[in-house]
Every structure is written in structure tokens, then in C-alpha cells.
């Protein structure tokens, strides 16, 4: 039976890859032969298919969790599931849900092809560049830390000017950090369940393996900083935390939990690592909810918080909320996918689909908790 589920899962991953190519931009000259216009002309059908894929994705995720808890999913099974996910999903069209990977390429091109400062010069200033045909944020300077700009030179230069090669090298580059993150989670917990919770979470797979967001690089570095801190290598840990901050500045919030750790070390106090992970999750949650002050809450930001929550899977309520929130955050793509605009009712719908599932889940969890306390509800 398990083999059947695994086979269906592989076919499902292939279906996601096929679905992603419905979103090819008509101006993407490098893949013009694959352009169908379906996602732009058949918005309702596209949205329904996407919702169906999300439901199936989380059904598989919950099934894998169930099998693990029941002792029917082993380490070799997890390695297999992660391997097929990492092998199949990178072949998807990365701009199915976000155009950020194009922005990474454009910024790298400003720095390493045009030899200009991407913090001053915008891609749109190179009016003849073919990337402008399908970019969605060409009128912005670099938004990320200098270390990220430096690192992007590797996949960009190895692409030797071929857009498609550069595109998939960027995805491969990000996936290397995804694999590294899974290894660090294993090193920190020695728990395959934690690896499963992060590595097979559909939000992580969609936003990292498919869309290629650089948040996983930031996550890898701050988890690696914790790894070395646990081995009393404080200088190296500080360097890695700084590196994480220089990828995305959101890591600045981790100065709070790291400060607590350093203080505990100097005072020779015993460290509760579970409390540290909770503090880390809280610090990143604060940054997550402050995101609308700049633009809006983006689904891939939740990987910052998930990285900590999966280190402490015994906190069942946090785990439940993280699964529900992962699902509801991916629902934020639906309004634009259906309506084709970021204005009108789209912002309101995004708020509703993001927070209503969390509110209902919390409400029913409290009810369950109360009714479970038999002493409070004895029938006379």
C-alpha cells in the first residue's frame, strides 16, 4: 500500500511540474514554444486546479506525518520522498507563483555583466535588455544583502550568458541550501520527524524548490550558526549569523535569541535549547507580521518561522498551527490568479484566506481541549 502512495506521489509531482508551465509569460522569448496562455485566459479553471493541487499536496503531507507517527514511515522512506521531490520539482517553471528568481538574475546581471552597482542602478535603466520583457520589478534597486549579490555571481557566471542555463542554475543553487538546511535540522535534532516536517511541507517545496526564493539561504546560515554555537564555537557562530543578515536583513531579529545564548554562556547558565528555538520562532514571527509596513506578508517568509518550529515538534499546537498557516499562506495566491489584479477585492480576500483558517483551527482546538478535560464536563 505504501508503495502505491509513493508512486502516486511521484505522478503528482510530475503533474505540478506540468501545471507550472501554464504560467509561462507571453514575453518570455526563451520558452515561447511552450506558451499556451491558459493561465491568463482560463483564470477560473487555473485557480480551481491550483486549489486542487494544494489540497492534494497537504493531504500527502498529513499522510506522511500519520505514517511516521504510526511507525510505518522510516528513514529510508523519507530519504526517498525528499529525493524524488528534489529531483522532479526543479524542472518546474519557477515563476508559477513568483517572479523573484527573475529579479535575482537581473540584479546579478547588473553587477556581473554591466559591472554597475545594483544598489544604485536599476535593471530598467538598461532599456535594451531582453529581461525587461518579462520582469515584474525592474524599477527597483537590489533589495537583498551584499552577500546574496556576491553569491549570485556563481550561478550567473556559470551560465555563460544562456538565460535558461542561468535560470536553472539559480534553482539548483537554492536547492543546495535547501538540502544543507535539512542536514542541519537533522544534526540539531537527530530526529527524522523534524526533517520530514520541514522538508516535505508543501509551502517549503513550492517556495524553495519550485520558486527558488533565497530565504532558504538565510535560514541555512542562521541554523548553521546555532549548530556551531551548540559546539561552543562562538566566533564562527557570530560570523555565520552576520552572513545570514547579509543575505536578508530579517535575520537581524535573531540578535535577541542569540544575545540570550551568549549571555547564558558568559554566566555559565544552563541553556534550554527548546526555549531558544521558541524565542527564535517568536523573533522571526515579529518580523513576519511587521512585513506589511514595507509591502505585504509573502508566503515564503514563513520558512523563517518553520525552521524553528520543526526543531521542537513536541509542541503539538505550534505544529498544528504551522501546518494550517502553511496552507492558508499558499491560498494568498488565489485572488490574483483568479482576478488578475492586486487591487479591488484582492487585498481583502488575501487577509481572509490567510487568517480565517487559523482562527477556526484555534477555536476548535480550544473546544477539543476543554471537552477533553472530563472533570469539567461530567454528565450526571
Image (cartoon, rainbow, N blue to C red):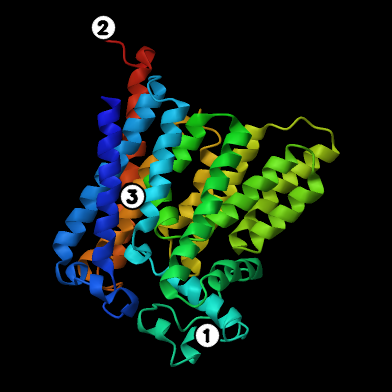
**On the picture, is 365 further left or further right than 175?**
left
Q: Say whether marks 2 and 1 touch (CB < 8 Å).
A: no
Q: How far is disc 3 from disc 2 in space, using C-alphas?
A: 41 Å
Q: How far is disc 2 from disc 1 in space, using C-alphas?
A: 73 Å
Q: Which residue is drawn at 63% across and 83% down?
A: 117
Q: Residue at x 33, y 26 (%)?
A: 368
Residue where numbered disc 1 is placed: 122
Q: Residues within 10 Å of mark 3 (few under 14, many from 20)?
A: many
Q: Is residue 206 visible?
A: no
Residue in front for this viewpoint, 3 or 138: 3
Q: Which quadrant would residue 56 be assigned to in this image? A: top left
**Residue 330 image point, x, y percent:** 34, 53
Q: Is residue 161 above or below residue 127?
A: above
The disc, 2 or 1, on the residue closer to the chain's N-terminal end is 1
Q: How far is disc 1 from disc 3 in space, using C-alphas?
A: 34 Å
Q: In this view, does 81 lie above or below 252?
A: above
What numbered label is drawn on residue 328? Answer: 3
Q: In what element is the residue under mark 1? A: loop
The disc, 3 or 2, on the residue closer to the chain's N-terminal end is 3
Q: Say whether marks 1 and 3 touch (CB < 8 Å).
A: no
Q: How crowded is mark 1: few (under 14 residues within 10 Å), some or many (20 or more)?
A: some
Q: Residue at x 48, y 56 (%)?
A: 301
Q: Can residue 273 be seen in this view?
A: yes
Quadrant location of the C terminus?
top left
Residue where numbered disc 2 is placed: 380
The disc, 1 or 3, on the residue closer to the chain's N-terminal end is 1
**On the picture, is 210 further left or further right than 55?**
right
Amino acid at each position: 500500500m505504501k508503495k502505491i502512495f509513493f508512486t502516486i506521489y511521484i505522478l503528482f509531482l510530475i503533474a505540478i511540474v506540468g501545471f507550472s508551465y501554464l504560467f509561462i509569460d507571453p514575453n518570455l522569448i526563451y520558452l515561447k514554444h511552450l506558451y499556451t496562455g491558459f493561465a491568463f485566459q482560463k483564470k477560473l479553471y487555473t485557480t480551481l486546479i491550483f486549489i486542487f493541487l494544494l489540497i492534494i499536496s497537504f493531504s500527502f503531507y498529513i499522510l506522511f506525518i500519520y505514517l511516521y507517527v504510526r511507525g510505518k514511515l522510516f528513514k529510508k522512506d523519507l530519504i526517498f520522498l525528499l529525493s524524488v521531490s528534489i529531483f522532479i520539482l526543479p524542472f518546474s517553471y519557477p515563476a508559477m507563483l513568483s517572479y523573484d528568481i527573475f529579479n535575482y538574475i537581473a540584479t546579478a546581471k547588473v553587477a556581473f555583466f554591466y559591472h554597475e552597482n545594483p544598489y544604485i542602478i536599476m535593471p530598467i535603466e538598461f532599456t535594451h535588455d531582453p529581461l525587461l520583457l518579462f520582469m515584474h520589478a525592474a524599477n527597483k534597486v537590489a533589495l537583498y544583502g551584499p552577500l546574496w549579490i556576491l553569491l549570485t555571481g556563481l550561478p550567473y557566471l556559470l551560465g555563460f550568458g544562456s538565460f535558461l542555463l542561468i535560470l536553472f542554475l539559480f534553482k539548483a543553487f537554492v536547492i543546495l541550501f535547501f538540502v544543507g538546511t535539512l542536514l542541519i535540522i537533522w544534526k540539531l535534532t537527530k530526529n527524522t520527524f523534524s526533517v520530514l516536517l520541514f522538508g516535505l511541507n508543501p509551502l517549503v517545496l513550492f517556495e524553495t524548490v519550485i520558486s527558488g526564493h533565497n530565504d532558504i539561504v538565510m535560514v541555512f546560515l542562521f541554523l548553521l550558526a546555532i549548530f556551531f554555537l551548540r559546539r561552543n564555537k562562538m566566533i564562527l557562530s557570530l560570523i555565520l549569523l552576520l552572513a545570514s543578515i547579509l543575505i536578508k536583513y530579517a535575520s537581524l531579529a535573531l540578535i535577541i535569541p542569540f544575545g540570550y545564548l551568549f549571555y547564558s554562556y558568559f554566566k555559565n547558565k544552563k541553556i534550554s535549547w527548546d526555549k531558544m528555538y521558541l524565542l527564535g520562532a517568536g523573533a522571526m514571527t515579529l518580523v513576519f507580521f511587521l512585513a506589511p509596513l514595507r509591502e505585504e506578508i509573502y508566503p515564503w517568509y514563513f520558512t523563517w518561522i518553520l525552521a524553528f518550529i520543526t526543531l521542537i515538534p513536541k509542541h503539538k499546537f505550534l505544529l498544528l498551527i504551522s501546518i494550517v498557516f502553511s496552507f492558508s499562506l499558499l491560498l494568498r495566491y488565489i485572488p490574483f490568479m483568479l482576478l488578475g489584479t492586486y487591487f479591488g477585492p484582492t487585498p481583502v480576500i488575501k487577509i481572509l484566506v490567510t487568517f480565517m483558517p487559523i482562527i477556526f483551527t484555534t477555536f476548535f482546538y480550544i473546544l477539543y481541549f476543554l471537552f477533553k478535560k472530563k472533570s469539567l464536563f461530567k454528565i450526571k
